[in-house]
Amino acid sequence: MLRASWALMFLLVGQEASPPSPADNAPPPESPPPAADGAAPASPAPAEGGADDAAPAAPPAAPPALRIDLETFVQRFMAQQLDLIAAEQQVARAGAQQGVAGARFRVDWNGDVPAGYRFRLLGGNAVTPFHEGAIAPAGTGLTVDDPLGGRTSLYADGVLTTSPTIPFNQGQAGAVRAEYALPLWRNLIGALYLLEQRSAEQGFVAADQRKKAVTVTRCAAGVGTFLEVEAFEEMDQIWQDLLARKEQVLKQTQRDYGRRLVTRLDWLSAQSDWEQSQQRYRDFQIQRRQRVQGLLAVLDDPAARKATLDTVQVRAAPGASSPDAPAPVDDWLAAHPAMAALDALSSQIDVEVERQKRSIAPEVFLVPEVGSGVQSHNKLAGGGGAVYVDAYAQMSVRWQFPVFVQRQRHDLAALYADRTRVDREKQSLRLALLADAARWEAEAARYEAQRVQSDTRVTLAQQQIREARGMFGQGRLEFQDFLQHWDVYETARLSQVSFRLQRDLAVLRRYSAQGRLVPVCAPKTTRFDEDTP
């Protein structure tokens, strides 16, 4: 009779788990005798009620299930990363600076309209007064800077003079001139402009590569966060299956104990095992809740704000982080965006050093100039006047020799220090990347091997449970030993998911260390898919 009862129990345990019904929780028809210390069996049972009791109120409708795919989550996750936003702003700023450096064609309109009074302090005679009178010069012109460093100037000016002593003693003068200043040394053929443009280009490349490096890191972090939630959801299903089976064991043990078919020790062992499993599941739920709430906070969507722990459904694309063949070191190290950013920064510093050296060099301009002028003057009231018209053409040489350039020399010394610093950063980064890539590659291989072993352990644990069931039915195995075999099976199934998660996270970190973007981070158009209640 004892063996037949336990055979029935093992038959129930071997079935697929299903949610318990209220009838299953009803107390057994034969209550177990009270223990010597007054303890009573702690079996889960619902509260009993009479037929005349009021019907319980209908529970509120549960929120619809929220299905979240990996691509959608990664897009939302990336959009909220402050360091990535800052990197994008730096790229935009570098692009604007590049545009400024390349725009060297400039036109300015100049003009001046002063007013003054002119005195003659020496010379003259009795007819000519010691004060000439008011003067009103005015001028306007255009200056055009070209990408070759030259400057074209077009200018026109005029002067009107009056004498308060002799009413009609006045004069006018006007002139038009044009010149072109061609640099021959410091900025020959726009050399300074070209260096400034090259510096801006390298600055843009450095900013863009830094953005790519941040994108690679944050993409791997976002995918890892999602895969953690997915793994915890899978482990939750395993937990529910295991608890359902253990609840069947507890109920069967309680019924057999009420019929005096099992010992009190077996019944207490089953109850203790059930309580321990419940506590472990509660601890697991705390960790699961933290990860799910973190995922929902990233989404910041009305549907996500209504979701609960039990309505979230996550699904990742197959092979989102599956291990692949490691890339050759020379390939990924040369293409690593962080290394490329430092290379561009080093090139920018070299260009700036050359530009600073050239900026303190002498400059010589060859300036051809042409012009024409006209003057008219009325000497006496009612008398005749004189008009003069002239034209000229000339070639001149202008020069600028820097005398005091202390600030530029300090800037040059700072650039040399920056170049040394960047070179050291490149060496340190290279060693760190190689170490991280090797570490995570080894970790991924180790967790993959453990995952394969866990698959074998799950298969063996299932076989052990079947063997333990037969041995216990024959009276050759204690109940506590059977529970230990069941614990081994629990641990094997949970470890199977855990090792796969650890392998996936190690693969993602290897991607990040090698500067490789996870394929799932490619931009795609995705949306939330919300079920109707």
Image: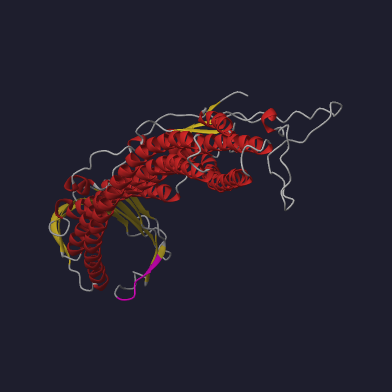
Task: Provide the residue span drawn in magenta.
Answer: 117-122
Point out residue 375 in the picture as x, y percentages from the top left corner: 27, 54
Viewed as shown, does residue 441 lie left or right of 525?
left
Residue visible at 25% across and 71% down in the picture: 410
Q: Which residue extends farthest top? A: 532
Give residue 379's quadrant in the image.
bottom left
Viewed as shown, does residue 196 lie left or right of 493?
left
Residue visible at 54% across and 30% down in the picture: 7
* Residue 176 shows in the view: no
Residue closest to the eye, 405 or 352: 352
Viewed as shown, does residue 259 lie left or right of 309?
right
Residue closest to the eye, 74 or 425: 74
Point out residue 486 in the picture as x, y percentages from the top left corner: 49, 41
In the rendered image, residue 18 lying in the magenta stretch gets the answer: no
- When the figure is inspected, residue 448 is found, relative to residue 369, above or below; the finding is above
Q: Check the picture and name the quadrant holding the N terminus.
A: top right
Point out residue 38 in the picture as x, y percentages from the top left corner: 74, 51
Q: Check the picture and name the quadrant holding the C terminus.
A: top right
* Residue 127 shows in the view: yes
Residue visible at 15% across and 51% down in the picture: 189
- When the figure is inspected, residue 409 is found, relative to residue 479, above or below; the finding is below
Residue closest to the eye, 458 or 193: 458
Point out residue 278 in the picture as x, y percentages from the top left corner: 59, 44
